[in-house]
Amino acid sequence: MLRTYSSKEHIEQLSVAVKIENLTVEYNGRPTLFNINLDIPSGVLMAVLGPNNSGKTTLLKIIAGINKPSAGNVYIYSRPANALKNDIAYVPARNSVNWDFPINLYDLVLMGSYNRLKKVESPGNKDKVSAREALERMGLDTISKKSICDLSRGEKHRALIARSLVQDARIYIMDEPMIAADEESINIIIDVLQELRHKKKTVIVSHYDFVTIPRYFDMVSLLNVRLIAGGKTEDVLTEENFEKAYGMYAGMIKNIRLYMEESNVRNK
């Protein structure tokens, strides 16, 4: 039986942030994920990679406690996933959000404080300061009164991440936070992901661009319903693993190796 921890100090000292055991998820009798076993260390930046319909979003929602598995278990700092929901900030895919809702950007970001408020409470001064700081960090402070329906694609991505920053969680789970975003937004988002990791947060991101993964991510989970491989980036991104996940690999591996070589040169 896994040991449980009651204090924040003990939780922060645990080396494994997320432990997934024999996880299977089925929809309409078909497995979306099958028999996944994976440990995600605390304080890493992990990419979840795989082809369309490989189970990336499903995995993120299971870890976040939004959906329930058909079989198996997910532990967050040794506890069941739903026991520490306030310690997990989930950033959904941009297209899954109703952007026609009649609120402005500031109010959307302030919603990040709701997880720690009681039902009858309203956000206080500290929450409002956190929202303003998050907007500034994401480069959105000058448009805080803008209606969310008028935001660009990149601004929408940044807005959802700003909302998660207000939550001040230990684990951040993001569903393709950079897809179809402009270059400015991508650069800001990458900087924030790196900052979260430096603050010892655990960040799990489904990512569409396998070529840039070696630059940004410590670890990778490569999915195609099953877990093809999970671990350090350089160990997972191999020809054999890509062939299993995608059925093709030559061009991918060549580009990935070039990026990895360039990154190694810059880091020396």
Image (cartoon, rainbow, N blue to C red):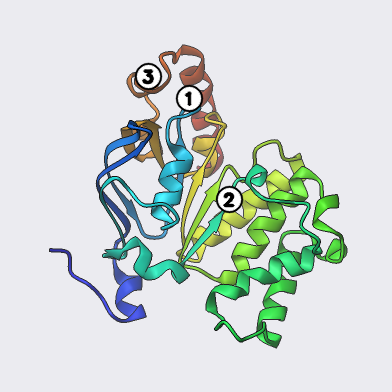
Q: Which of 7 and 196 is in front in this view?
A: 7
Q: What residue type is labelled 2?
A: Pro
Q: Mark 3 points at which residue?
A: 239
Residue positioned 69% across, 49% down in the render = 157
Secondary structure of residue under mark 1: helix
Q: Where is 121 relative to 32, above or below?
A: below
Tell me: 103 left or right of 39.
right
In front: label 2 or label 1: 2
Label 3 packing within 10 angstroms: few (<14), some (14-19), many (20+): some
- Real-space CA distance between mark 2 and mark 3, rounded to the nearest whole angstrom: 31 Å
First along the sequence among labels 3 and 1:
3
Residue positioned 60% across, 45% down in the render = 93
First along the sequence among labels 2 and 1:
2
Q: Which amino acid does label 1 sit on?
A: Arg
Quadrant of res 158: bottom right
Asked if labels 3 and 2 touch by Cβ distance under 8 angstroms, the answer is no
Q: Mark 2 points at which residue?
A: 92
Which disc, if any, is residue 257?
1
Tag count in the figure?
A: 3
Q: Where is 236 relative to 110, above or below?
A: above
Q: Nearer the viewer, residue 7 or 215?
A: 7
Residue 264, percent from left and from top:
49, 36
In front: label 3 or label 1: 3
Residue 98, percent from left and from top:
70, 51
Secondary structure of residue under mark 2: loop
Dividing the image into 4 quarters, which one contains the N terminus?
Answer: bottom left
- Real-space CA distance between mark 3 and mark 1, rounded to the nearest whole angstrom: 11 Å
